[in-house]
Amino acid sequence: MTTTTPRRPSPTAHTVRRLGAALLRLAGWFWALAVVVIVLANVVGWATRGSTDVSIAVYARQASTWFPFSLGIMLVSAYLRVHVASGMTRRTFVRAALVVQVAAALGYAAVLTLLVLVERAVHDALGWDSVITEVQLADASAPPWALLGDLAVPLVLANLSGLLVGIVYQRGGAWWGTLTLPLTVGPVVAALYVPGLRLMEVPGLWTTASDAQVLVLAVALGAVLAVLTASAFSLLARGAPVAAKP
Amino acid sequence: MTATTTGWGVELHGVTQRYGDVVALDDVTLTVRPGTITGLLGRNGSGKSTLASLVAAFRRPTAGRVLVDGEDPWENERVVPGVCFVRESGDVLDDYSLRDNLAYVSGARPAFSHELAGELLDLFELEPRRKPSKLSRGKKSAFGIVLGLASRAPLTILDEVHLGLDAPSRYAFYDALLADYAEHPRTLVLSSHLIGEIERLLEDVVVLDRGRVLVAQDAEGLRAEGLSVTGPADAVERFVAGRDVLASQRLAGTVQTTVRGVLTEGEVRRARDAGLELGPVPLQDLFVHLTDPQRTAGAADASRAADR
């Protein structure tokens, strides 16, 4: 007697659906909370000073960078072991994790851009300013595409960095995971704060180039760092042993 | 496209696995026949879980080759969906419901049976809405069994999956395993310390000791290497005198002794004449004898002396 093994659906697509659903649920909670905080902060500014002349929404940039970063770590620690134990390769996990993390980063950037623009429209209607005091390239006069590009670079890097941090901790343990943080998280910190050089008018390319040129440069550098981070994650994850749960 | 199989065989050629200074498996060469139920036995730390981890491509061997259905399983898109390794620690999403976990696994296992999964959930009284993190140890083990059997993988390895299960649940597991194995033949590897309980299921036996293969043969052949002698204490003691005694149990005036070796027809007749009952050797006794540290240390000394 024989058994017949039917073909299974694409493991990458299956994993993208599962990981995507998990991230979407958490993103729903995150943005619901963010909207409440943004509205409350605007109301407090109006109640105490008569108007809120800065963009509150753009401050969500830090939270929307580091929250999905932490979810990247969680994806590796919670799902890689289960993925392999369920009969799928590390290769398909890497593909799925990269797809959902990049998609999540772009989604977060899009939602944050939308919130900033909606808030700006409300401020305009009320006769308030929407000054951006966060360290970033796109200021209050920047077009939406520039704002989106500026927000997306650190978000994509952070999400990929979360995966890298997760796999380094998993493979190397607490010591290596912590000692390599400057390498694994450094690119995100650079993407977040290097644009500040332009605001500080430090001499050099960052100051002399036009807004558009600097933004294109930042996006290009971010893309290179993202590819390097994703490659490092892929390399480490594809050789990872799957230890028993402690 | 479909693949037709009666279960997948396993071959290990000179496999060594080291964890730092610790040698978990030492130059292991072994074959698991396709379509059999093989018992993987050994004391704690003998290398059973490591061996299963290599076969399931959970890790790569330090040296040697592992073949599953003729191919290296490492990152092998054809092979890994057909190898299901369920370990005692449980590889599930702790904070998702059992239903979500089943959905995750079923989407990855080509032959997954939702029908069998449902039956087993009922059998072990598992509520699909519960999360693994909220289950008792026995219930977690039961869920591992559900995943392992319902996956119907051509090679299924169950490593100490009975831990924490009460006796009725363990026997329900054995019955369910046999019933599904009969309907859907595949290769099953069972690792357990409850040798007396799983003995009846096993067709082949592999005994590991300190990372080396001590025994790898069919269970019947192994049982034929010894026998149990039951009867009045005096008669049993006289009969087994000078033989390799593996174990002995006394109940009032009756003794059951397990001895190693094969009897001649004359010896069998003499035993019957003395009112003794002869029976098959319990695997548990053979296992305890084979893995006795004093015995294996003596064998190692003898081997070293021979090398000199």
Image: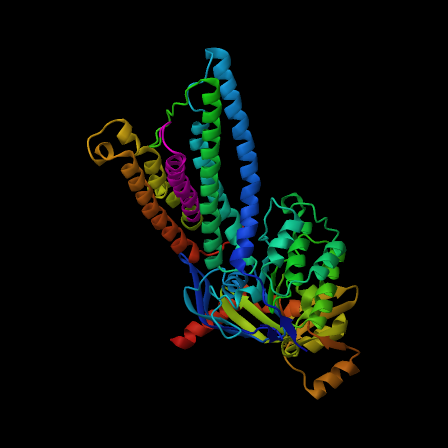
- The residue under the point 45% across, 40% down is A69
The spot of residue A225 in percent (x, y) is: 33, 46
Q: Nearer the viewer, residue A112 or B98?
A: A112
Q: Is residue A170 above or below residue B279?
A: above
Q: Position of residue A49 (x, y in %)?
A: 46, 12
As for residue B14 lying within the magenta part, the answer is no
The location of residue B252, given as percent across then percent down, is 79, 64
The quarter of the image holding the N terminus of chain A is bottom right
* Bounds of the magenta segment: A139-167
Determine the image quadrant of residue B268.
bottom right
In the image as oriented, which residue stretches furthest toward the left?
A203
Can I make out residue A244 in this image?
Answer: no
B169 on left or right of A2: right
Q: Position of residue B132 (x, y in %)?
A: 64, 47
Specify whether residue B225 is in view: yes
Residue ID at (35%, 31%): A136
**Residue B85 or residue B23, whichever sits in front:** B85
- Farthest bottom residue in view: B266
Q: Of residues B30 and A76, which is closer to you in this image?
A: A76
- Seen at 47% across and 50% down, the residue is A99
